[in-house]
């Protein structure tokens, strides 16, 4: 019985298994990279939203301070009369 065909088949299967294993690792790395990119994009989007909300809140506080000073001036003027 010639064992050469069996050795060739085993060699072929081992090579294919190693290739599949290497490709699987590469695929997992690519998936992890894509997940990381998505997370970074989501974080950046949330950061921009928070910065926008902060700016609007600061503007609202400034407006309320302006109104407060106007009201205080009006009360002072009324008290003087």
Image (cartoon, rainbow, N blue to C red):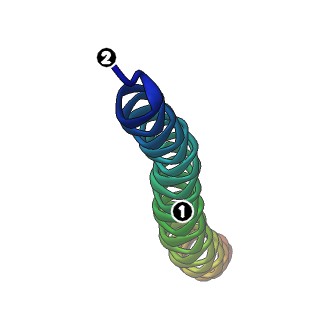
Front-lying residue, 60 or 38: 38
Most extreme residue toward the top is: 1
Q: Which residue is mark 2?
A: 1
Residue drawn at the location 62% of the way across and 76% of the way down: 55
Q: Is residue 59 above or below residue 1?
A: below
- Secondary structure at badge 1 equals helix
Most extreme residue toward the front is: 1
Residue drawn at the location 64% of the way across and 81% of the way down: 66
Question: Where's the C terminus, which quadrant?
Answer: bottom right
Crowd around label 2: few <14 · some 14–19 · many ≥20 (10 Å)? few
In the figure, residue 43 lies in which quadrant? bottom right
Q: Is residue 44 above or below residue 59?
A: above
Front-lying residue, 56 or 46: 46
Residue 51 screen position, x and y as percent:
62, 70
Front-lying residue, 26 or 32: 26
Q: Is residue 74 above or below residue 13?
A: below
- Secondary structure at badge 2 equals loop
Residue 49 screen position, x and y as percent:
48, 71
Q: Nearer the viewer, mark 1 or mark 2?
A: 2
Most extreme residue toward the left is: 1
Crowd around label 1: few <14 · some 14–19 · many ≥20 (10 Å)? few
Residue drawn at the location 52% of the way across and 47% of the way down: 19
Q: Which residue is mark 1?
A: 50
Sequence-first disc among 1 and 2? 2
Residue 4 screen position, x and y as percent:
46, 32
Asked whether residue 81 appears in the rendered view, the answer is no
Residue drawn at the location 49% of the way across and 36% of the way down: 21
């Amino acid at each position: 019985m010639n064992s050469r065909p069996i050795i060739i088949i085993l060699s072929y299967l081992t090579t294919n298994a190693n290739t599949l294993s290497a490709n699987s690792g590469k695929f997992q790395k690519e998936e992890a990279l894509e997940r990381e990119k998505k997370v970074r994009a989501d974080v950046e989007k949330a950061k921009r939203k928070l910065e926008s909300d902060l700016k609007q809140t600061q503007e609202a506080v400034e407006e309320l301070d302006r109104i407060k000073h106007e009201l205080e001036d009006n009360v002072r003027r009324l008290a003087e009369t």
